[in-house]
Amino acid sequence: MSDTKVLSYLGLSMRAGKLLTGDEIVHKAIRSGEAKMVIVAGDASANTQKKFRDKCATYKVPLLIGLDRDRIGSSIGKDTRVVLAVTDLGFAKMISKQVGIMSEVEYIE
């Protein structure tokens, strides 16, 4: 299934040092242009999803909403994670390709 590939790519990007986690850190990455893609857990609050949807739309950063916080966290070797920023264009493109195959993900450009 392609969601396992996305989770695998997240793990690879974390090990490569190309992934940021945390609300404020991701906000700074979006504003500075460092974020190439933002991922928000599908089970995040509606307020959190709206906040990042608006911020990503303003700065024209691709946004992926989907997966659940437990699977995202375990894929990068951490506890639950709600929001991530991919800072490498190559990893962002690899994840984007898989998103078209996934059915449980809402993808916004």
Image: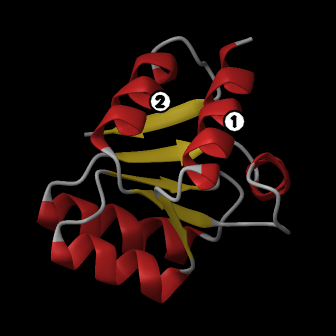
In the picture, the quarter occupied by the N terminus is top right
Residue type pointed to by label 1: Leu
**In the image, 91: left or right of 68?**
left
What element does badge 2 sit on?
helix
Question: Which residue lies most toward the bottom here?
Answer: 24
Few, some or many residues within 10 Å of mark 2 (<14, 14–19, 20+): many
Q: Quadrant of residue 61?
A: bottom left
**Vertical comparison of 39 with 1: above or below:** below
Q: Residue furthest front?
A: 16
The quarter of the picture where the C terminus appears is: top left
- Given residues 62 and 32, the one toward you in this image is 32
Residue lying at 74% horizontally and 53% vertically, measured from the top left: 76
Q: Residues within 10 Å of mark 1 (few under 14, many from 20)?
A: some
| Relative to 100, residue 25 above or below | below
Residue 42: x and y, percent? Answer: 65, 51
| 78 up-or-down from 100: above or below | below
Report the Cα–Cα distance between label 1 and label 2. 9 Å
The numbered dot on residue 7 is 1
User: The residue under label 2 is which amino acid type?
Assistant: Ile
Number of numbered callouts drawn: 2
Q: Which residue is mark 2?
A: 95
Q: Earlier in the sequence, mark 1 or mark 2?
A: 1
Residues 84 and 16: in front is: 16
Residue at the image position 69 percent from the left and 32 percent from the top: 8
| Drawn side of residue 54 relative to residue 15, left or right | left
Which secondary structure lies at badge 1? helix
Residue drawn at (45%, 88%) of the image: 24
Please name the residue shown 61% across and 54% down the image: 14
Expressed as whole percent of the image width and height from the top left, the position of residue 15 reads: 64, 51
